[in-house]
Every structure is written in structure tokens, then in C-alpha cells.
Amino acid sequence: MTMKRLTLAAAVAAVAASGAVSGALTTAQAEDGIYIPLLTYRTGAFADSGTPIANGMSDYFALLNARDGGINGVKLVVEECETGYKTDVGVECYERTKTKGAVVYNPYSTGITNAIIPKTNGDKIPVLSMGYGLTPAADGRVFPWVFNLPTTYWSQASVFVKYVADQEGGMDKLKGKTIGLIHLDHPYGKEPIPTLEALSATHGFDFVTYPVPPKTMQDQRSTWEKIDSDEPDWLFMWGWGAMNPTAMKGAVDVDFPMERFIGVWWSGNESDVRDAGEKAAGYLAGDFHGVGDGWPLFKDLRDQVVGKDGSQTPDSMVGETLYNRGVFNAVVVSEAIRTAQGKFGNRAITGEEMRWGLENIVLDNARLDALGLAGFTNPINVTCQDHEGSHPVYLKKWDGAKWEKSTEWIEPMQDVVRPLIEEEAAKIAAERGLATNNCSS
Amino acid sequence: MDGTSFDLITVASTFIGGLFVDPFIAFYDRPDKLIQIVSQGLSAGVMYSLVALGFVVIFKASGVFNFAQGIMVVFAGLTVVSLIEIGVPAIAAVLLAIVVMGAMAFAIERMVLRPLVNQPGIILFMATIGLAFFLEGFGQTIFGADPKPVPIDALAIPDGKFKILGDVFRKPVRIYQLDLTALIAGGLMVAGIIVFLNRTKIGRALRAVADDNQAALSVGIPLPFIWVVVWTLSGLVAIFAGVMWGAQSQAGFSLAVIALKALPVLILGGFTSVPGAILGGMIIGVTEKLAEFYWRGVLGDGVEQWIGYVIALIILLFRPQGLFGEKIIERV
């Protein structure tokens, strides 16, 4: 074989291999079962965060197919579409998959979520943005097709402020303190700002932001020098992907006190703090589900899916924060399908029926127990008005080697957050001319 | 005076104050912070210089602007990290990475450069853009897309910090051992490259090719060999840059974007000057960090993203060849 042929063969092999990695779409669709497209990102700067979520979701759906024959005898047809966490690519994935009978979208990007929300009314396919996305979408009267259960960024931000107040000795002690927010300069990273500004005005603390551009999130030195110079009393973080471990290194470099550094639930994965190790001990992060593999469901996953054909999950990933979040997301999807089937029959459901399932989902302690997830999360109770469904958040602490639960479930300041959600939802409804459902029926 | 005029005067005075007064008051108030920011700028500058050096070495010898230099830095860094991950001792991993980059240089010469010899520079530039995309896809296939932590312990890279002048200022100035390592090792590497280019037979041949490749060919200097040498040399720089950049955060594909920050360094220092790449890196690094820290109030967050390009454009106005580049005079 000549050198030129060898070159061509190598190039074709490389392109083919990279195509396999990027999860090229197949011809799967609804006629084979219940079609669930997954907008994932296993490549790019955010792959470190996107991969365990994608694995958790895929593994749970694979478990249902392998162990139970699907849901009530109907197989789940799961297809990944690689977005690279890019909004335009995510929208393209949405457009390419929606005609195949998609019952729900899990975009795993606030940018993609915000971009496809305007399409949901017409396409009649619900979006489940679990713990991310557009916070005002929790008002189900304005956003009937969007569900951001079990809690939102604004609820979480208010929980953080409550925690800080508790540590300082009461809400009145917040006056004169400074709370900083280091965040990805992206729609996701800016989400908590309205709530923190409102709480700053109400409780008299100073609020300072430190944006980190996505393109240079691995070079945060200037930002951390600014933080070191400003000396905020507390620092919150809304980071994602490679921003998180870089920020941990930045905090260590400027000796920021870890016990006063609190990350959003997307800045609380093991990969975010593992590099910093013991130097990051004391760092706190919010969460809305359990961490670890101490639930019977994870034994099933290990026995029947992980390590088998089709699973991309290394055994060590089972029980990690973002893997568990992917599993939890898939549990919510499948329980909503089950709920919808209870009303519409044990068959492949439609997007509209899935919307009903999400709005009437029953995920109480008894059901969690039956799923092998007793105590894994706070019970979820979605209503027509409230698509947030649960609200409480707990804080966990990094001890240098693993996460430990640091607080009990903390109820958000609903008296502040809910009016903000309704006010912003009404504003969006007026701007976009959206009809409002009064939820009377 | 009406309200609009008053508002304009207020905005203008705030802007002028933020630009010309406030930063200098801050210098005076917190000299420790000024020293800290300058030292960080120098550290960032070393990193930019290392990437710029890779561009310069190739451009100097072949006139090719290698757009793939950024991804080569990532590729080289990930090669070292991945080899250590699978249990190869650190020294062996670095040596193997040199072999890999040499093999890559050979392959690029055979498959990309040789078929395009004597083509206009823009064609070669386009080819390196294609090469960058290929290396990114190929690299993700081999190494996976996840960023990887650089095993600094295995590579014996110190990660601590010294605190100095604590009794002079309100807060001590922190000097990071990682930065010092980059500075010292980077300095040695630059010295080595300068000696190689100026004192060795291959170095002289390389400069001859750079001056006139047809003339060089006519006196028996093998062009393909020289190209392999410069691309390998650039790969060596890439290994060092990839490991040091990665040690500051993680080694991953997003570093390729940061590597492009070397572009204003090249414009400033000149595309053909090794000292220019070093000094240009320092100037851009320090300016970026000072601007981001002291002038972000008036110039906006993220000023460090673009201020380097502004400086480079200003330099272009007065010295199109950069501060140290060779002035090209074409007679007609």
C-alpha cells in the first residue's frame, strides 16, 4: 500500500471513530417503543460534567429494558445526540429528533433549554430541566410544557443565603456583609443573580459578581486576585465543566477560606474537587439527591448494566454525584411515563400525555422505597401551578476525599422566591404574548 | 445646565477618573497587590511566550503560519499525561511524547507540507487549519474528551507557594512555585533554542532555508529534513507548554483556545523573532492582568480577553513587522 493510501485509510478510520464518539443519530424512533432523545455532551470542555450525567441516564433506561422489559411492557428507545454543550448544536439535535416521536427533552444546558422553550407550545413535547434552565418556568400557568423540578436556582440561592445567615447568627447579621458570586459568564451562570440582588436589597448585604468567560475558564487568576482583594465574607459559585476544578485551584492559591465557599449543585461533583483534594476540605455545595452507592437500585445497575455491552460507565463512577443525578433524572422521566400510562393505557405515550404524567407524577417516600431509593431525595409533588415540585436543598461538605452531608434539608425562602418567579413569568408572558392557564381544571 | 448635559459630564468624569485616576490610587494604596498582579502577568506571559515560540520556530524556517500550534500543545500535553496515567514512568512518558511529536512532524511533512511545496503561503496556512481540526478529532478519539489532571507529583513539578514581604505590606505577596518552574525551565528552553539556531550546523541550515529555500536547496540543504526538524522542535516546545498550561488547571482540549492568545504576542514581537516572542509574551501578559484588575471597572469584565489584540493592532500601525520582526523590503 502506498503512503497516500495509508494516509487516506488512517484519516477515514479517525473520522469514523470520532463520529462514533460523538453519538451520531441512528434511525431509532417511536414505533419501536417510547422514544427518548438525550441531548448529551461527551465531548468538549464540559465533557467532564456531561459524561457522568449521560451515563447515569442511559444506564437507568437500559436497566428498565433489561430487568423489567421497559415500562409496563413497552420498551424504551433511547438515542443520544451530542451537543458539546453548544446551544446551536443542541437546537439542531432537538429539530432532528422531535419528529421521531420524542416524549420529553432533557437538554442539560440552560442555553439549550432557553432556546427550545419557545418551541414547546407548538411542538407539544415537554422539557424536563431538572435543577437548571429558566427559573421562572416553575410557574406552570405560563410554562405548561416546562418542568424544572425538584428545585430551582433561585430556591437554591435563597437556601445559601439562609445558611449564611444561620452561620452569622441571624438574618439581621447579614447587614454590612459581602457575598460574592463567581459564575460562568453564560445564561446558566447568571441565573441566581436576580434572587441574590433582591435578597441583597432586603437584607442589606453587599452583592458582588465575578464573571468567568467560558472560553478562558481555565485561566481564572485575575478573577481570584480580584476576589482576594475584595475579601468577600462569603463566596458562592455557579460553575460548570472545567471552570470548577480551576476555581478550586484559584481558591486554594489565594487561601480563600473553604468553609465560606459554597457551590451550586453543578459545582459539587467529585471531579470538581478531587484534584484539590485535602486543600479543598471544608468546601460546601448544594444538592437535591443522595451521593454514594448505598441504595439497592445501584446494586441492580451494577449487576445488570454497568460493565456490560452498551454501558460506558466505569465502575468507579457509580455513586458519584453527577452519575446519580443522571440516574435520578431518568427515574423522574420513567415515573412520569408510568404515571401517564396509568391514565392513558400501557402503550407508547405521546408528548402531550408525557406532559400530563410530569404534572401528576407521584414520587413520595413509598414510591422511592419501591424503586430502591429510600431517602435518596425529598418527595416530589408537582402541581399545575408549581412545576418546581419539591424546593428544599441540603448542603454537603468535601472532607478532602469524599462528600459528607453537612445540613438537613433547608426550605428556600418561598416568600421571596415564589413572588419573584411569578413576577418574572408574567413579564415573559406579556413580552412573548403567552397565554396563561388559570389551572382551575 | 440641563439634566442631559449634567448626566453626560458625570459619565465622562467617572470614565476619565476610572481610566486615569482610580487605578493609580489603587497602585499607591495596595503596592502588594500591584506586585502580585505584575508577577501573575509575567507568569501568564511566560505561558504565552511558550506557545508563541512554537509558532515562531515553524514560521522562521518555512514561512508557514501553523494554525494547529494550539492543538499541538494540547496533543503533546495529553500524550504525557495519558502515558503516565497508564503507568509509564514520568521521564519515559516525556521521552515517548518527544518520539510521538517527532513522528507527527514526519507525518505532517510527508502528508501535508511536501505535496504543497512551492504553493502560496495562504494554501499552507489553510492546510494547517485542516490539520488543527483533524488533530482535535483524532486526539479526542485517542485520549477521550475529558480534561485530565496533570500528575505534577510524578513530573516533580512543585505546586506550593512562597509568601514574601509579609512584614512590609498589609498582605504578603504570593510567588507560586509552578510559575517559577515555568520561568526557569522556559528560560532554559529558549536559551537552548537560540543556541541551536545560531551555533549548530542544522540551525544554520534552518536559517538558510528561512532566508531563501530555493537557494538553500541549490547548495544541498535538504528541505524535507529541515521541515521535520522545525516541526519536531515546535513539538518539543508544545510538550513543555502543554504540561505547564495543564498544571495550572487541567490538560484538555479547551486549552487550544487559550493557546490562541499567543497571536497578539506574535504580532507584537514579530513572527520571526525568538526574543520577540519572549518579550511580547511578557508585555501582553502583564498588560492583560493589569487591565483586568485595575481597569475592568471602566473597560468592562473580561477586558483581558481583548486588550492584547488592541495593543497588537496599535503596534501594527507603527511597526508592521512587530517590535523585533525583520523588516521585509521587496524591490520592484
Image (tube, rainbow, N blue to C red):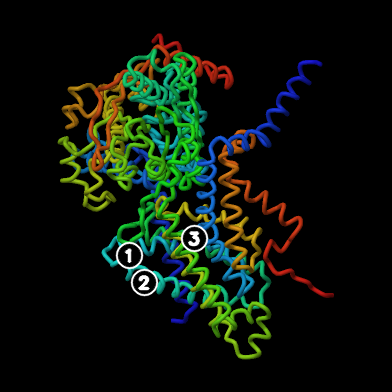
Check disc 1 and report its element: helix, strand or loop. helix
Answer whether labels 1 and 2 touch (C-beta < 8 Å). Answer: yes
Whole-number angstrom distance, CA of label 1 to CA of label 3: 18 Å
**Badge 1 amino acid:** Leu
Q: Residue B100's x, y, as percent?
A: 41, 71
Any mark on residue B71, and which? 3
Q: Nearer the viewer, residue A159 or A49?
A: A159
The crowding category of the residue bearing disc 2, from other C-alpha atoms within 10 Å (few below 14, some 14 to 19, many at least 20), is some
Q: Nearer the viewer, residue A269 or B52?
A: B52
What residue appears at the point 21 percent right and 46 percent down from the top-left corner? A305
Q: Earlier in the sequence, mark 1 or mark 3?
A: 3
**Badge 3 amino acid:** Ile
Q: Are marks 1 and 3 on the same chain?
A: yes
What residue appears at the point 37 percent right and 47 percent down from the top-left corner? A48
The C terminus of chain B lies in quadrant: bottom right
Mark 1 = which residue?
B83
Any mark on residue A401, and which? none
Whole-number angstrom distance, CA of label 1 to CA of label 2: 8 Å
Q: Earlier in the sequence, mark 1 or mark 2?
A: 1
What residue appears at the point 35 percent right and 34 percent down from the top-left corner? A257
Q: Earlier in the sequence, mark 2 or mark 3?
A: 3
Check disc 2 and report its element: helix, strand or loop. helix
Q: Residue B110's x, y, as percent?
A: 52, 78
* Above or below, B7 relative to B263: above
Q: Residue B165's x, y, as percent?
A: 45, 45
Mark 2 = which residue?
B96
Query: How many labels, in total?
Result: 3
Q: Chain of mark 2?
A: B
